[in-house]
Image (cartoon, rainbow, N blue to C red):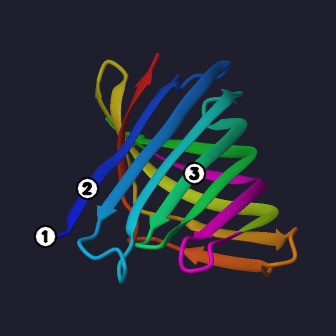
Amino acid sequence: MKKLLLVLALAIFGFANAQKGTVFVSGNVGYYSQKSDNPGSSPDYTNFSFSPKVGYQYNDNWTVGVESNIANTKNTYSIGEYKTNGFSVGGFIRYSKPLGGIFSVYGDLGAGYQNVKQIQYNGGFIPSSSITKASGFYVGVTPALFLNINKGFGLNFNIGGLGYNTLNNTTHNGSDAKNFNFSFGQAISVGISKNF
């Protein structure tokens, strides 16, 4: 049996109003799954993420609000598994600018707290398990394009962003991490939104 690769593209949904004094609600949902014929050398892998946002548009171009993210990954080998559960919550500010006609561009600047828990289980000759916990902060910039299709319904296009995050280990069996991420042109998401 050939390797099965299933990608359920990000489903982005949102409700927004392009006028001041309104509330903006949106979210991203992502799922990825890979099944291996030989889990001894290449693991089965699944990933799920959900990222909601709620904001207040205080004038025609600026929105401020809160954002969060929940992510779960699981790698399954022939003799064990490795799970990662992540959570983040923070604030964001968005600047949007109509380009004329049906197009608008916007950029989000977000920052906040994040927490990660990793669980590793080995079921070999001598079974063992370990838990690693870490917490830190993140900051990121994400540009996007909005295409208004009909009566406030539209499509959002994003091709990556720029980010920095830290994770400080809170258990004895792990290490601290600092990451800089430049993903322009490497990640693409397309979604729908509604302005009313």
In the drawing, does residue 194 fall left or right of residue 57?
A: left
Q: Is residue 123 magenta?
A: yes
Q: Quadrant of residue 54?
A: top right
Main secondary-structure element of the magenta-colored stretch: strand
Would you name the residue on which mark 3 appears?
A: 71
> Residue placed at 52% from the left, 58% from the top?
73
- Residue placed most toward the observer, 94 or 68: 68
Density class for disc 1 (Cα within 10 Å; few <14, some 14-19, many ≥20) is few
In the drawing, does residue 53 fall left or right of residue 113?
A: left
Magenta stretch?
105-129
- Residue placed most toward the observer, 169 or 63: 169
Q: Which mark is residue 2?
A: 1
> Residue placed at 74% from the left, 45% from the top?
89
Depth check, mark 2 against mark 1: the one in front is 1
Q: Which mark is residue 6?
A: 2
Give the spatial CA distance, label 2 vs label 1: 12 Å
In the drawing, does residue 129 fall left or right of residue 113?
A: left
Depth check, mark 3 against mark 1: the one in front is 1
The kind of residue on which mark 1 rests is Lys
- If you read the primary sequence from the N terminus, does the residue marked by circle 3 or circle 1 appear first? 1
The kind of residue on which mark 2 rests is Leu
Q: Which mark is residue 110?
A: none
Density class for disc 2 (Cα within 10 Å; few <14, some 14-19, many ≥20) is few
Where's the N terminus, which quadrant? bottom left
Q: Contact, CB < 8 Å: mark 2 with mark 1? A: no
The kind of residue on which mark 3 rests is Ala
